[in-house]
Amino acid sequence: MFTGIVEDLGEVEAIEHTGGSARIFVRSATVTQDARPGDSIAVNGVCLTVTGLIDGRPGATPVADEPPASSPRGFSADVMGETLKRSGLDGLEPGSKVNLERSVRLEDRLGGHLVQGHVAAIPRSTGKSSASACRRASPGTSCTKAPSPSTASA
């Protein structure tokens, strides 16, 4: 779970495409200061699992299952084909800036709201209307007018 509040602006260092999936390498000392392989980090709102930490030396490769000797300067994560297809991560390239957030811990203060970072559906916009005149619409449905106060109690 995430709060939706961006902690750091990271930078894509490299992307390795393998078949329909990819491995992404992201530079950020902030979100990796206490990270370990297996932790979740949201990249542009998409929950990814840390597969390795990038050593503080430039050009160092990530090492899975063990923390780096020095403070990590970034992390790697595998991105499956379905995630690439249904998120904005497929458009990333080396040098792209990305919003980063570590997952919340039970003892953390919640300064935003709780979001999962997992794709559940892709809604289709059916037009524009005033939010105050609409009820909450389910994905794929159009917005319906809310009852007026005079007819709501009748």
Image (cartoon, rainbow, N blue to C red):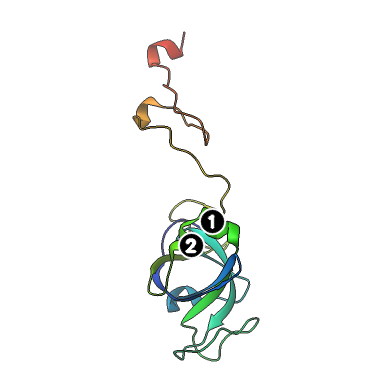
Q: Quadrant of residue 20?
A: bottom right
Q: Where is residue 16 in the image (x, y as percent from the top left)?
A: 53, 75
Give the residue at the far top of this rendering.
154
Q: What is the quadrant of the N terminus in the image?
A: bottom right
Estimate the spatial distance between the alpha carbons at disc 1 and disc 2, rounded to whole Å: 7 Å
Q: Which amino acid does label 1 sit on?
A: Lys
* Secondary structure category for the residue under label 1: helix
- Whether pointer 1 and pointer 2 mark residues with C-beta atoms closer than 8 Å, the reply is yes
Is residue 146 visible in the rendered image? The answer is: yes
Residue at the spot 54% in from the left edge and 56% down from the top edge: 85
Neighbours of disc 1 within 10 Å: few (<14), some (14-19), many (20+): few
Residue at the spot 42% in from the left edge and 21% down from the top edge: 146
Residue at the spot 39% in from the left edge and 16% down from the top edge: 149
Is 114 on the left-hand or right-hand side of 6?
right
Closer to us: 124 or 100: 124
Residue corresponding to mark 1: 85
Q: Position of residue 131 (x, y in %)?
A: 37, 32
Residue corresponding to mark 2: 90
Task: State the mark number for residue 61.
Answer: none
Neighbours of disc 2 within 10 Å: few (<14), some (14-19), many (20+): some
Q: Which amino acid does label 2 sit on?
A: Asp
* Secondary structure category for the residue under label 2: helix
Give the residue at the far front of this rendering.
19
Residue at the spot 41% in from the left edge and 27% down from the top edge: 134
Q: Position of residue 32 (x, y in %)?
A: 50, 76
Closer to us: 2 or 12: 12
Q: Position of residue 130 (x, y in %)?
A: 34, 30
